[in-house]
């Protein structure tokens, strides 16, 4: 149930920081949503990276670094798998998708025993990007992460071109522009962290510019970014490539056209659908996506729009100030709601990534 009176920005910021801090595990993992049946016990590199970036932006340095420690430990755990993937690709016999790195890990760095739509590349880019943003902000030591950074870069350089599941764990057969952007952002950040040897650094640089070129040529239709290479549709996750990932400059005509297209097709009264055709819980409105739009608007100097999206995201919290993954006030296809509530229960609440994106936008608005 949404809260009755509008929650102030400060009040929600304090709640979100305390909530994230209280739920971070001893290993440094951020649970995606503590009680939600399908997410319980797991931490995603994608969600976690954006959560760490938000915490870092609010000077919760220890929390962000504990998360980066967790990422590094998870990657060291699968070091043999990384080496096998890289060697097989170099030999021209790439491993099957099932042998690629997982999307999420248990808190103690294991793959876990539940089936998932594994093999997504974006999170391996986002953790490098978030670490890079954190080091730039706080000047923290990079040395503890250098082995994990090198392994991640080698993995991405060898495999970035492979189709994989997208942010929404769908369409494994496509090359998703948001995923490509996350990988490019991660590789660029890794180069700046200055721990790669010359050869790996030049491979990372060449790969990042090849990806950016691919995005700007085949990842654009009608002037805006598209959901996957060859598609003409948009996906609201594309806003992240403008801010905070900064793969496309906020004032680039592609960025401007992308925001216009997302707003025309996916925004309803300040809330944001993932993409047309979404049926997950009926295809509702995602506060975290409205916050990505707010961040892009802020970078374009549109303060009014940035505040508008912040207020809408804040309006989705429950009486306990918990922000959900999505709200069902406007569903693209209500006939699909029941199948998901029957399968997994009510919508994931709180979703830590939702809180994080609100925090990140609130930080920009309060500077
Ligand atoms: C979403 C992912 C997210 C995961 C955990 C899934 O339903 O599609 O984007 O990473 O939940 O929050």
Image (cartoon, rainbow, N blue to C red):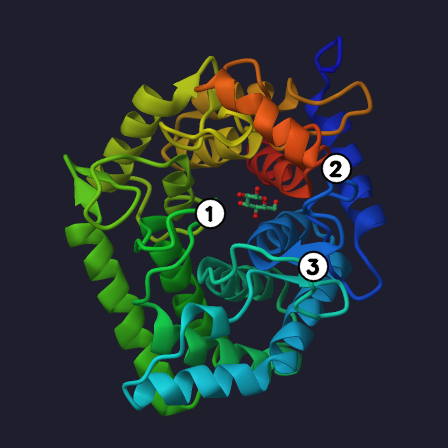
Residue plotted at (37% across, 82% down) = 201
Picture coordinates of residue 41 (x, y %)? 76, 54
Q: CA distance from mark 2 to mark 3?
A: 14 Å
Note whether 344 is above or below 57 in the view shown. Answer: above
Q: Secondary structure at mark 3?
A: helix
Residue plotted at (69% across, 29% down) = 323
Q: Is residue 55 visible?
A: yes
Q: Secondary structure at mark 1?
A: loop
Note whether 283 is above or below 173 in the view shown. Answer: above
Marker disc for residue 338: none
- Which tag, 2 or 3, sits closer to the chain's start? 2
215 or 62, which is in the foreground? 215
Residue beneath disc 2: 16
The residue sitting at the top extreme is 4
For this view, does 169 lie left or right of residue 110? left
Picture coordinates of residue 73 (x, y %)? 68, 76
Picture coordinates of residue 136 (x, y %)? 54, 63
Which quadrant of the figure contains the C terminus?
Answer: top right
Q: CA distance from mark 1 to mark 3?
A: 16 Å
Residue 106 placement: quadrant: bottom right
- Which tag, 1 or 3, sits closer to the chain's start? 3
Residue beneath disc 1: 244
- Which tag, 1 or 2, sits closer to the chain's start? 2
């Amino acid at each position: 149930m949404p809260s009755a009176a509008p929650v102030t920005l400060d009040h929600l910021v304090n709640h979100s920081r305390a909530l994230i801090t209280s739920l971070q595990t001893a290993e440094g993992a951020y649970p995606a949503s503590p009680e939600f049946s399908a997410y319980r016990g797991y931490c995603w590199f994608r969600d976690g990276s954006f959560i760490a970036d938000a915490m870092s932006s609010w000077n919760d340095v220890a929390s962000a670094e504990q998360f980066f420690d967790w990422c590094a430990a998870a990657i060291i755990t699968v070091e043999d798998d990384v080496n096998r993937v890289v060697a097989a690709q170099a030999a021209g016999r790439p491993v099957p998708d099932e042998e690629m790195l997982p999307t999420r890990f248990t808190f103690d760095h294991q793959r876990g025993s539940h089936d998932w739509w594994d093999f997504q590349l974006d999170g391996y880019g986002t953790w490098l990007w978030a670490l890079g943003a954190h080091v730039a902000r706080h000047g923290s030591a990079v040395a503890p992460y250098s082995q994990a950074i090198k392994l991640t870069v080698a993995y991405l350089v060898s495999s970035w071109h492979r189709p994989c599941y997208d942010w929404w764990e769908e369409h494994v057969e496509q090359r998703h522009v948001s995923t490509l952007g996350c990988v490019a952002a991660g590789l660029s950040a890794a180069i700046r962290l200055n721990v790669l040897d010359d050869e790996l650094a030049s491979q990372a640089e060449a790969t990042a510019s090849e990806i950016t070129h691919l995005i700007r040529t085949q990842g654009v239709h009608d002037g805006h970014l598209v959901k996957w290479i060859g598609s003409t549709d948009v996906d609201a996750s594309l806003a992240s490539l403008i801010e905070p990932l900064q793969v496309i400059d906020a004032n680039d005509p592609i960025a401007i056209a992308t925001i216009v297209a997302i707003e025309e097709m996916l925004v309803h009264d300040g809330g944001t659908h993932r993409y047309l055709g979404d049926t997950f819980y009926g295809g509702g409105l995602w506060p975290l996506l409205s916050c990505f739009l707010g961040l892009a608007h802020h970078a374009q100097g549109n303060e009014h729009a940035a505040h508008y999206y912040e207020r809408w995201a804040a309006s989705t919290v429950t009486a306990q100030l918990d922000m959900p993954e999505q709200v069902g006030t406007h569903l693209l296809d209500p006939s699909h709601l029941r199948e998901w509530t029957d399968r997994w229960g009510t919508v994931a609440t709180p979703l830590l990534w939702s809180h994080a994106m609100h925090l990140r936008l609130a930080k920009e608005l309060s500077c």
